[in-house]
Image (cartoon, rainbow, N blue to C red):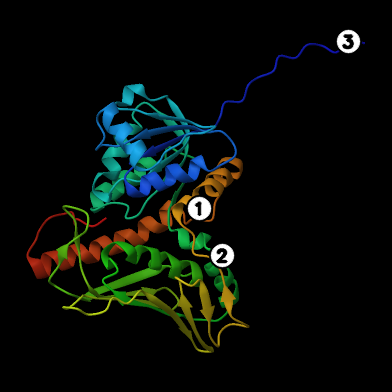
Amino acid sequence: MEKPFVKETIQPNPRIAIVGVGQLGSRYVQGLLSGSEPLDIWLQDPAIDTRAAFDTWKSAYFIDPGIHSVRFALTPNELPDRFDLIISATTADVRFQSLNTFLEGKTFDYLILEKLLTTGVKDLNNLTTLMQRGKGCWVNHPRRLWPLYQQLRSELQATGQLRIIVEGTDWNLASNCSHFCDLARWFTDEELVSLDCSSIESDWMESKRLGFVGFTGTLKYYFSQGSELVLESSGLVGNDAVFPISVSIRAMLGEVAIDEEQGTAQGSLLKGNLQGESLYQSELTSDLVREILETGQCALPKFEDVRDDHAIYLTGLLDYQRNIHGNLSETIMIT
């Protein structure tokens, strides 16, 4: 008996958008292009407003689409109406506005946001409303994806309260603090309760990114079951040597010393020395995106958890800015 004719439907390639293709956004693009399954990739950046500028960007970052489709939209009208996943890699000051403009009249399933989320509480609240339009949203704190920290977390279960200390020279504390706040939350399964900003230096400096600020000093985080996180960044003086960051974890039963550059962890809290890679964004992106598209889940922290921590951070810094600098602005230029 002849089989009835069944019309085949062609499953379109997953459609991914990256908003913001500067240094970090370009790493996302490179990561996506390394995947073996073809993707329909759309790019937009507030700083790129001509086709010639886009061609220059492609050359600068050695973008070779290969099996993928890579297109750049100069205006929202050039974009399709629906995306499977959107990645926001802009600076924090324009994150909400750039996404709000990008998403006008469009639908999406999933979203990944870079840190820091915003420079003010108002934008953070608006971003929260925007995120409710999708099925899931995460914030890119990639240490949760590093094999070293995954091994370490499994060994730290049931060790009780932790005191995590991160020290180094001029390591962009204002921006990178959020990575370690998330790491502490993940290791301890505790919620952030409060933040002490009183020991950061009052003489803030210009960031490497034009228009943004940074600072040195100490931030102290306190969590719901008694764990603590202490972040210390010392400024450079004269010809002082630059020390890379060191991470140590202390508990009642012992301690651990972590060397991120070497990918090692050792100490009395562990059954044995640990070895694991510290991975770059371009190495993480392809597997991360595939997991989200296939399962609707991933190992990154959910937006709502990071949002609450970021609100505490913003409130602390805005109070400091108002009380110490006499600056009444409702935003703080960190990214």
Q: Is residue 34 visible?
A: yes
Relative vertical location of residue 124 with respect to residue 59 in this rendering, above or below: below
Q: Is residue 109 left or right of residue 75?
A: right
Label 2, label 3: how many angstroms apart (C-alpha)? 54 Å
Q: Residues within 10 Å of mark 1 (few under 14, many from 20)?
A: some
Q: Which of the two marks, 1 or 2, is nearer to us in this view?
A: 1
Where's the C terminus, which quadrant? bottom left
Label 3, label 1: how many angstroms apart (C-alpha)? 49 Å
Q: Position of residue 244 (x, y in %)?
A: 35, 74
Q: Which of the two marks, 2 or 3, is nearer to us in this view?
A: 2
Q: Mark 1 is on which residue type?
A: Glu
Q: Position of residue 305 (x, y in %)?
A: 42, 58
Q: Which residue is mark 1?
A: 283
Name which of mark 1 and mark 2 comes first in the sequence: 2
Q: Which residue is mark 2?
A: 147
Name which of mark 3 and mark 1 comes first in the sequence: 3
Q: Of the numbered discs in the image, which one, if any, rests on residue 2?
A: 3
